[in-house]
Amino acid sequence: MAGSMQQAARFDDLREDRGTRVSIADTPILLVRQGDQVHAFSADCPHAGAPLEEGAICNGRIVCPWHKGTFAVADGSLIEPPPLTGLKRYPVAIENGNVLVSPHEQTGPVHTPGADTRTMVVIGAGAAGAAACAALREAGFDGRLVLIGPEHGMPYDRTALSKFVLAGDMPPEKIPPLLPDDFLSTQRIERVEAHVEKLDAGTKQIDLSNKLTLNYDAALICTGGIPKRMDVPGSNLPGVFLLRSRDDASTILASLEGARQALIVGASFIGLEVASSLRKRGMDVTVIAPGKVPLRSQFGDELGRMFQRLHEKNGVVFRMQSKVAAFLGDDVVSSAQLDNGEKLPADAVIIGTGVRPATDFLQGVELADDGGVPVDSSMRAAPGLYAAGDIAQFPLPRSDQTLRIEHWRVAQQHARVAALNMAGGDEHYTGVPYFWTYHFGKRFEYLGHASEHDDVVIDGDLDAQAFIAYLLKDGQVAAAVACEREAPAARLAEAMRSSLTLAQARSAAAG
């Protein structure tokens, strides 16, 4: 090994607040200084390939610039998703002020599965389900592990559907899987493609649509949301679509051949992402929504109007303060009639008016009024039963709220906590909710959660989409929205694990 060590950098040139990328024998490596030590890891995030040197190092964590996954500075191990594995490690030595690194990965001991007779079941083969399976095996659970979900194949990155697939940037079959192709086989995970018809929390029994019955020692429910259909005449006409799955996207894409006019019902994140995607295809796009300003409930008027101006600049037409009274057409939708009588032509309609929790099969647990599953900070809903993601009504850290958050990464954060507890740990969700949305080539990041706010302070230029906006409640930063501020947002994502004043948040973002 000593002969393979190569000079990578001078120790004094390395900073402690960010990593340094080097290349050793064509291997990209991230050098991280920690006091008088240096660690060497793979330089790109295993989730989506983000260059980790463009993120931040704080609180003993390496923070990914793109999606805010975190790794331990000490050993590169995974702390928070969306990555589902840790970083590769490389041997390092310091001699005469020079940092020497080997390009040969440092491997740990091979794990030999033990004799574990327990059965654990993960219901929901999406982002949370993938994170849970990875975390259970990482935590050393060696028993029977069953992953249940009705869609065919491996869990995949559902966020690509509205952001990239409908834009034509990525075919549905090319959506990245969330786990390596051989993960299920190498990790001895049973993949069952079926619906759950009943889960009895009292008897710990699951009945499936394929007539299989399972008994579990611990189970995680992460079934996500079911898109809400509209209760208006014509809502079942061909050409009126919901977007939830890869098959939905394929069906929508097939309908767009030769289509010119698209209507989006709902000025939600999904609705506006679809609007951006369809404009990229050159379609005429109209967004219909009942509110005065898009995304007002999430961000307030000023930020909501910024999103509307961005879309209008790129050709999207808005019909705000409007509702669809009916969809019209003979064999296929041809127009939408608004509540004021106006008719808008449509070759395709995409509904983006929210989801409801997919929990109809659950028995033995009292559900919240909206169908969500109440859990504690360990994500526990009942003895041996956990819930994560869109369905979980959980205590929001650093607040007195219990609520559901329908964010993809939050689902993975929840699932990792639940899985580690299923494996015998004592973990609690203390994270900072994080969400990102994509419009006309611009990535917007949302950190924290503000159910309501009383002030917004903006550092930067909203209409240039280069800013951090702080949403304040009672003098504290409840949430932040950022664009083209990836490293400051990475630092904020860590700092917001504590309550922050505006001055403290600005200081953290500045680094």
Image (cartoon, rainbow, N blue to C red):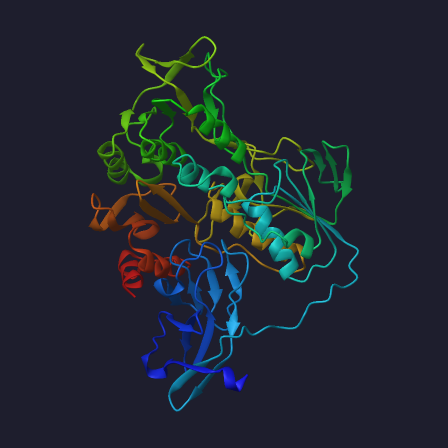
On the picture, is 47 further left or further right than 147?
A: left
Q: As displayed, is residue 241 above or below residue 63?
A: above
Give how far across and how far down residue 389 sits, in percent. Answer: 53, 44
Quadrant containing the N terminus in the rendered view:
bottom right
Q: As displayed, is residue 291 above or below residue 179?
A: above
Q: Residue at x 32, y 43 (%)?
A: 453
> Looking at this rendering, what residue extends furthest in the bottom direction?
96
Using the rendered view, name the quadrant where residue 226 is placed.
Answer: top right
Q: Residue at x 68, y 70 (%)?
A: 110
Give how far across and how far down residue 376 sits, in percent. Answer: 57, 49
Residue 212 visible in the current orientation: yes
Of residues 289 and 12, the one nearer the viewer is 12
Q: Which residue is drawn at 37% across and 62% down?
A: 55
Of residues 243 and 511, the one nearer the viewer is 243
Give how far across and how far down residue 405 sits, in percent. Answer: 47, 42
On the picture, is 356 further left or further right than 353?
A: right
Q: Which residue is drawn at 46% across and 52% down?
A: 397
